[in-house]
Image (tube, rainbow, N blue to C red):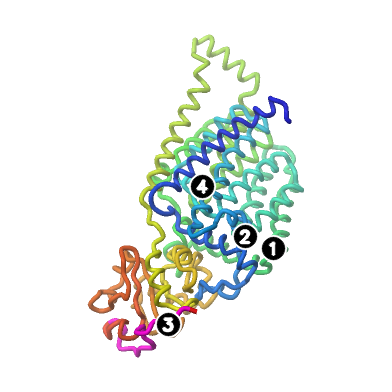
Amino acid sequence: MPPRNERRAWILPGLIFSYFLGIFIFVHARPGGQIERDGYFHARAAQTLPARGLSRKFPWTQASIWKETFHDKEFLYHLWLAPFARGESPIRGAAVASSLLAAGIFAGFFLLLRHHAVPWPLLGTTILAAMGGPFLLRLSFVRAHVLSVFLFIIALHFLLSRKPKALAILGAVYAWSYSVPLIFPAFAFLYCLGRKLSGEEADWKLAGAAVAGVVGGLVVHPYTPLSIGSLWTHLQILTIAATQRSLAAIEVAREFAPYGTRDFLLAYPGLVLTAIVLVLGGWRAGKKASAETMGLLTAAAAAFLATLVVSRTIEYAAPLAAAAVMFAARDVFDDETVKSLSAWMKKERRPRFLLKPGFFLIVLGVHTHCLAYVFAMADNNDNPRFHAAAHWMRKNLKEGETVVNLWWDDFPDLYYSAPRQRFLVGLDPTFMLQWDKEKALKLERMRTAREPLDPAWLAETFEARVMILRAPSTRFYQQLQWSVWKPVYADGTAAIYALSGPLGPSSAARGGLPVIQDLTSPPQSR
């Protein structure tokens, strides 16, 4: 049994872990569904992982290269979720599993600061929790970036401890866990560059080890060589997000979009205040900054700028900024400086005992503001949107039959509620372009109403008899007026339309195109 003082050393990290676990569990326990719909995909993918194994086919997305060349880019994340994602509602267990990782991020950050002799590690952890509401919100998602941030905290420890072998191993784990593992060696390079700027040895072998680990992990990945191709696709997505945005032929996820200046300031008060402190105190910190601090400052500055362009980079900007400001404080407030400050406060009769609590209360107030944002966003989100529609599909469609979905962000809900059916697009629309550019662009033009819906083309191309939409999406299409094209099923969240036959569109909706098949005699399930 460890000595009493060693046991006590784990009390505070345990309390931090319990506090944040309680927050994230509370978020998931609130009425309604997931804030971020991709969680439904990850829950179902984790639940079916034992049955699917390492299959390279994913027939649930017919209009995607995934259909024949599937690569689970978040394999280890799904492996972690699998024991939790059980029963008829796997999202519940998956949410608990992801919350454990999210809580581990803050406990791990506290241990990181304490291990490297940073004063006030609890204050530093609170600063991390006060970076911004969207940062905390993203950690509540059931998505693989939560595992990525958890691994990133471990990576910071290995960088600061200068352990290249450990970094190489972690790089391989990263490659099996996250869709864009190059983020890890990129920040390792920036850290080494910062060390060089401090006048100390850069220790480039740290960055080299991170690169070697990620490349090695991709090479020996269970889905190699598809793992390398998938990485290229995600680099394309980042390029579209950073350069083309609304001008892109295929829309990318909104999480890649930048913030406006006002929105950024309101969303990330802790990050902005930390940046101001680092800039104003830079002249002082620069004189005494260690190589480790300069490495963190360089990486944090790059991550801050990247967040202005691609908003989801906050996942790395937040821990880097919090670590940088605490390491800078460690260097600036050495024994001599602390003694001088104490003497001045005593001379001026300033209450020294209020200094630490004062800082902590300010940061805690910002953290509370961030929590209010998270709780507001967690309220009254839709439950799985196609749950009732899935019941209709089970009764009226064959198992394995394709259902047209135009909106790729509907796919997580569809896959979760109706896994017996097949759909067209999902998650990453860029995979559509690699499947068939001409057909992908036609689908995108129909989705955005730049081209009329073509029910005959959809039916013939995908051998589909029905199309499903979220109920709010139907108003975007003039053809879907009930007098022209009446749904065969509709509720408050979903509508299903026959593509042909007597229950399909009128001639006004299909432009006089011939019918292909009807739904008058629903087929029996296999």
Q: CA distance from mark 2 to mark 3?
A: 36 Å
Secondary structure found at label 3: loop
Give the residue type at disc 1.
Answer: His
Could you say where residue 439 lies in the image, as x and y percent from the top left?
47, 79
The label on residue 284 is none
Give the residue type at disc 3.
Answer: Pro
The residue positioned 39% from the left and 57% from the top of the image is 383
Tell me which label, 2 or 3, sits earlier in the chain.
Answer: 2
Give the residue type at disc 4.
Answer: Leu
The residue positioned 59% from the left and 70% from the top of the image is 70
Tell me which label, 1 or 4, sits earlier in the chain.
Answer: 4
Q: Which residues are magenta?
A: 509-525
User: Is 298 located above or below residue 462 in the figure?
Assistant: above
To which residue does mark 4 refer? 139
To which residue does mark 1 refer? 221
Task: Say if mark 1 contacts mark 4, CB within 8 Å.
Answer: no
Q: Is residue 177 left or right of residue 366?
A: right
Tell me which label, 1 or 2, sits earlier in the chain.
Answer: 2
User: Is 141 located above or below residue 347 in the figure?
Assistant: below
In the picture as drawn, the residue positioned furthest to the left comes out as 483
Secondary structure found at label 1: loop
Give the residue type at disc 2.
Answer: Phe
Could you say where residue 10 lies in the image, as x and y percent from the top left?
64, 32
Q: CA distance from mark 3 to mark 1?
A: 41 Å
Q: CA distance from mark 4 to mark 3?
A: 44 Å
